[in-house]
Image (cartoon, grey):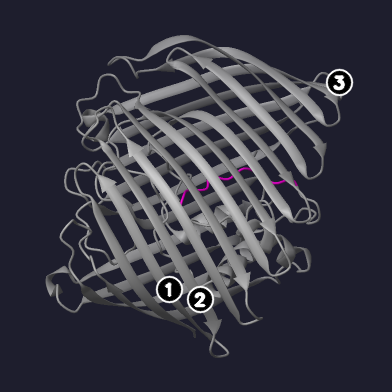
Amino acid sequence: MDTAMGKKPPTKHMPIRSTAVMLGVALTAPLVAAQSTEKGVEPKPSIKVAPRVTVTETWTDNVRLNGTGQTELITEVSPGLHVDFNKARLKGFLDYSLSGIAYANSTAANRTVNVMSSNLQLEAVDGTLFVDASGSISQQAASAFGAQLVDNTSVNSNRTEVSTYRISPFVKGHLGDAATYSARYSRSTTSSGAIGASDSATSEMILGLKGDFGAKRLGWTADIRNQEVSYSVGRTTENGTALLGLTFAITPRFNVTAESGIDSNNFTGQNRESSTASGAGLTWTPLASTKLSAILLKHSYGDTYKLDFDHRTARTVWNFSDSKMVTQSPNSQGTGSSGTAYDLYYAQFAATEPDPVARAQLVSSYLQTYGISPGSVVSTGFTSASVALEHRQQLSFALLGKRSTITFIASQSESTRLDAVTTAIDDFTKSPTVRQQGLSGNFAHRLSPDYSLSLLLSHIETVGALSAQSTSLRSMNLTLTGKIGKKTTAAIGLRKVNTESSATPFSESAVTARVNLQL
């Protein structure tokens, strides 16, 4: 449902929404965020600009992530800018940094890396016309079966810089007392710098009506959705649905839905074919801090569904999600955002701080406190040249103590090429199905008001159809972070990585030292 980003709902005992959290990062964010926002106040209308400079020195014994190993000393200088927009009609943020990376020995590998995260909403006409805009630039693995990314400084031929931009105007309002309406158009583009990788462009139109029959418990819905995805080295696929539905509130906290209509797509042929589609769903909120939602739709190409369970107590956050959806980028973190720590935590804070400005400030403060670079790589996605059907499951748990936080996350995904006609070459050409599984655990401890220590252990495994198409990455990161000045923080980290792969097995040890100055 489209909502104006400026509204601030109640902050206490809020239900936790599911977010797509990838392996390799802790889930401490929601708990820390909750404590911060419940005591906070809504930011005053303003535009705040916060420049910064971060200098990182890294020593590694395997800069090229291969079996031979090459010692290297790497200097990374990253000027950056964070802008919070909190005006009457404009809400959101923009975070950008440009990193210059210099190698003491492998000078030919010197390069620059762009990192950006942005999410803005403009209220063009009071309560009626809005425009959403977002963008992301991050590092990503070109292939799921190649050497996976460790950080931005490793010399990895499987690395590519992926940029995604999206603009989406929408309108909403009331048709008298009979119904509410919404209409949204979205246009997004994704570009990859890898040789042979595909760029993509997506156009989507969504129309919706919702009303009741004069009874508060019984309502109706009408939804039309059409999407077109074009790949530069593939083909254009189209899909759409037109559904009519009924909603019934069994109790104020338990709603059920049923819908039926027409589905059309060209996934299995050159021409678009139509078939019937039907589905059902439910939403149950037994407590303000507990929510269960599920929706299932039957299509000609198979079932799609999404199930989410969220529960929150004063000291814990629990989440389980199970989904099977059509996606244009496997294991992506959401439209316009995937790959960086900033993107991840911005999505993770959504449940505890819906206001985009306050959330952006919260993310920046959290990353600085725990010595996390906003542009650090956290995505396990890979580039593709066709739409896929992705089945993804995730279980996460976080426990907050007075000074310590323990978190755990387990996830698995199975992505299968859905386009049966394309001749594009990507990972789905090598293997029709790509499976990924992973576990991660994090322990974070506040040593003092100015110093913190965190230990992250993670494991991720990628498997294809052939025995040769497998890779397993285990990593350990130990980081000590402290405040050394009014606007300056420093962090020292130890990293150990081991990868088992039929193609590129390797191990790596690294020491990092980072200083961040907020100007």
Q: Is residue 313 left or right of residue 97?
A: right
The residue at the point 39 percent across, 57 percent down is 475
Q: SS of the residue at dot 3? A: loop
Quadrant of the rendered image containing residue 353? bottom right
Which residue in the protein does label 2 denote? Answer: 480
Magenta residues (range): 15-24
Mark 1 or mark 2: whose residue is earlier in sequence: 2
Q: SS of the residue at dot 2? A: strand
Q: Are marks 3 and 1 in contact (CB under 8 Å)?
A: no
Return the x and y of residue 481 as percentages of the image width and height: 52, 77
Magenta-drawn stretch contains 17 = yes
Seen in the picture, residue 260 relative to 336 is either above or below; the reply is above
Q: Residue furthest bottom?
A: 485
Q: SS of the residue at dot 1? A: strand
Which quarter of the image is occupied by the N terminus? Answer: top right
Q: Residue furthest left?
A: 108
Disc 3 residue crowd, few under 14, some 14–19, many 20+, Cα 10 Å: few
Which residue in the protein does label 1 denote? Answer: 493
Return the x and y of residue 470 as percentages of the image width and height: 28, 38
User: Which of 434 and 477 lies nearest the eye of the viewer?
Assistant: 477
Magenta portion: prevailing SS class: loop
The residue at the point 25 percent across, 19 percent down is 421
In space, the residues marked 3 and 1 are separated at their CA atoms by 62 Å
Query: What's the amino acid at mark 1?
Result: Gly
Query: What's the amino acid at mark 3?
Result: Gly
How many numbered markers are drawn? 3
